[in-house]
């Protein structure tokens, strides 16, 4: 009798369990970067050029398959992928490089950002290190750096990366051309404000 009740209960509960809705990504913009997966992508917006020469946010945690979308404030920033051990230089020939985004600072002080964005796809769960290569003002050496999926327990943290960047004597490096991501029209010109 008791067992029979349990079985009935289990049978009744099962459809409820299987019908539970799957988790949905929070936002669905940024479908340009890759066509390999047709499901909606989570897009993480990063604004380059906050006062103090910063990326905001600069410490991003993103699932594989998600998109990082860089928006650019005045006056002329970029983003380049580095290795942890050599900040302010492209990691290798495949490192992403967004090109520069000159944006005039409005005389009335109003908020403005570039009409273009740069998107990268997070391909796996390995850390991604990046920097701004604007040499006028030595942005990378001044701390305009960031990380995706840093491993806090490994000792390879954003703060250590930033300290290494501060010690770079030479100029920051760029790639010969825009690569490793998608540069195109800004889908959300007020994103990040
Ligand atoms: C933006 O910065 C890059 C790198 O310093 C420079 O080559 C380019 O001329 C700058 N663009 C403008 C419009 O200032
Ligand atoms: Cu910069």
Image (spheres, grey):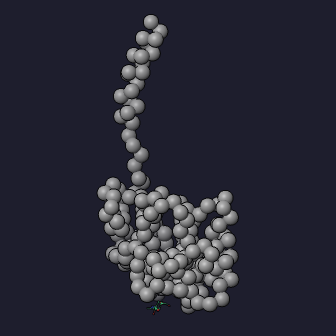
| Labels in figure, total | 0
> Which quadrant of the figure has residue 40?
bottom left
Give me the residue at 68% from left, 76% from top: 163
Instruction: Spot the residue most to the top.
Output: 1
Q: Quadrant of the N terminus?
A: top left
Whether residue 75 is visible here, answered yes or no, is: no
Left or right of residue 45: residue 89: right
Q: 6 or 58: which is nearer to us?
A: 6
18 in relation to 172, above or below: above
152 in relation to 50, above or below: above
62 in relation to 138, above or below: above
Left or right of residue 162: residue 125: left
> Which quadrant of the figure has residue 181?
bottom left
Q: 123 or 76: which is nearer to us?
A: 123
Give me the residue at 64% from left, 79% from top: 165
53 in relation to 192, above or below: below
Picture coordinates of residue 151 (x, y %)? 61, 61
Picture coordinates of residue 184 (x, y %)? 34, 76
> Which quadrant of the figure has residue 14?
top left
Whether residue 39 is visible here, answered yes or no, is: yes
Give me the residue at 31% from left, 57% from top: 38
Picture coordinates of residue 81 (x, y %)? 51, 75
Left or right of residue 53: residue 193: left
Left or right of residue 58: residue 2: left
Q: 185 or 193: which is nearer to us?
A: 185
Picture coordinates of residue 39 (x, y %)? 33, 55
């Amino acid at each position: 009798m008791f067992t029979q009740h349990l079985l009935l209960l289990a049978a009744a509960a099962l459809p409820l369990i299987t019908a539970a809705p799957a988790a949905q990504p929070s936002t669905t913009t940024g479908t340009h970067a890759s066509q390999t997966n047709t499901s909606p992508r989570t897009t993480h917006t990063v604004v380059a050029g906050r006062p103090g020469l910063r990326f905001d946010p600069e410490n991003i945690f993103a699932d594989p398959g998600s998109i990082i979308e860089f928006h650019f404030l005045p006056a002329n920033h970029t983003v380049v992928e580095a290795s942890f051990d050599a900040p302010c230089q492209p990691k290798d020939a495949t490192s992403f490089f967004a090109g520069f985004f000159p944006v005039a600072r409005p005389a009335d002080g109003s908020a403005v950002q570039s009409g273009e964005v740069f998107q990268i796809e997070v391909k796996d769960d390995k850390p991604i290190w990046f920097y701004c290569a604007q040499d006028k003002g030595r942005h990378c050496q001044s701390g305009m750096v960031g990380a995706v999926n840093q491993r806090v327990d490994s000792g390879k943290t954003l703060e250590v990366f930033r300290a290494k960047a501060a010690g770079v004597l030479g100029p920051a490096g760029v790639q010969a051309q825009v690569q490793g991501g998608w540069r195109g029209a800004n889908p959300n010109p007020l994103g990040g404000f």
